[in-house]
Amino acid sequence: MENSAKTKTKISNLVKAELPEVHIKLIKKLKGKHNLINKFIHIPDIVGGGDIDAIKALNKSIYDVNKYIKVGRIKYDLVGFSFNKLMQLKFEYLIEDEESELCSKAYLLEETEGWRVTKIEAYWNPYQ
């Protein structure tokens, strides 16, 4: 279990190469980015008196999205999305390298040329 700069660079390069393709396959599997967003943002109205069991629906939606996105040694979990200042769609993924046990967050931005990893945060090991 080596946490060297070389290992982190290798993971980052792998994520930059894989994540756009993984994301495109996820969009295709869920029949479009709008369906992905709608499935991911199902938020139950618990505060407004909605059914507390609606949390189960939220957890199922997140599971349904994330079950499609493990590739090789890297596990990707979609944890959020937003829009940048130019109103470009940006997805946030939690990434975990199963070999080194290092985790981080990666941000994927929709540009005119396609999807691009714009940032990978500092790595940490949740098991230490």
Image (cartoon, grey):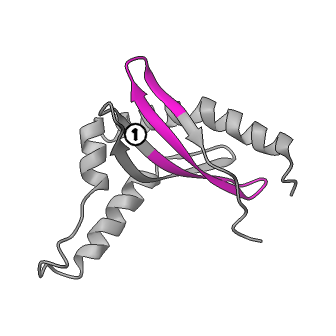
The residue carrying pointer 1 sits among few (fewer than 14), some (14 to 19) or many (20 or more) residues within 10 Å by Cα, namely: many
Looking at the image, which residue sits at the far top? 113
2 relative to 108, above or below: below
37 relative to 127, above or below: above
Q: How many marks?
A: 1
The x and y percentages for residue 26 are 41, 40
Q: In which quarter of the image is residue 13?
A: top right
Amino acid type at image mark 1: Lys
Q: Which residue is drawn at 19% across and 78% down?
A: 46
Instruction: Let me know if residue 23 is in the magenta part.
Output: no
Q: Give the range drawn in magenta.
A: 92-117
**Image quadrant where one finds the C terminus:** bottom right
Instruction: Let me know if residue 102 is in the magenta part.
Output: yes
Q: Residue at x 69, y 38 (%)?
A: 12
Q: Which residue is drawn at 39% across and 30% down?
A: 110
Name the residue beneath numbered marker 1: 90
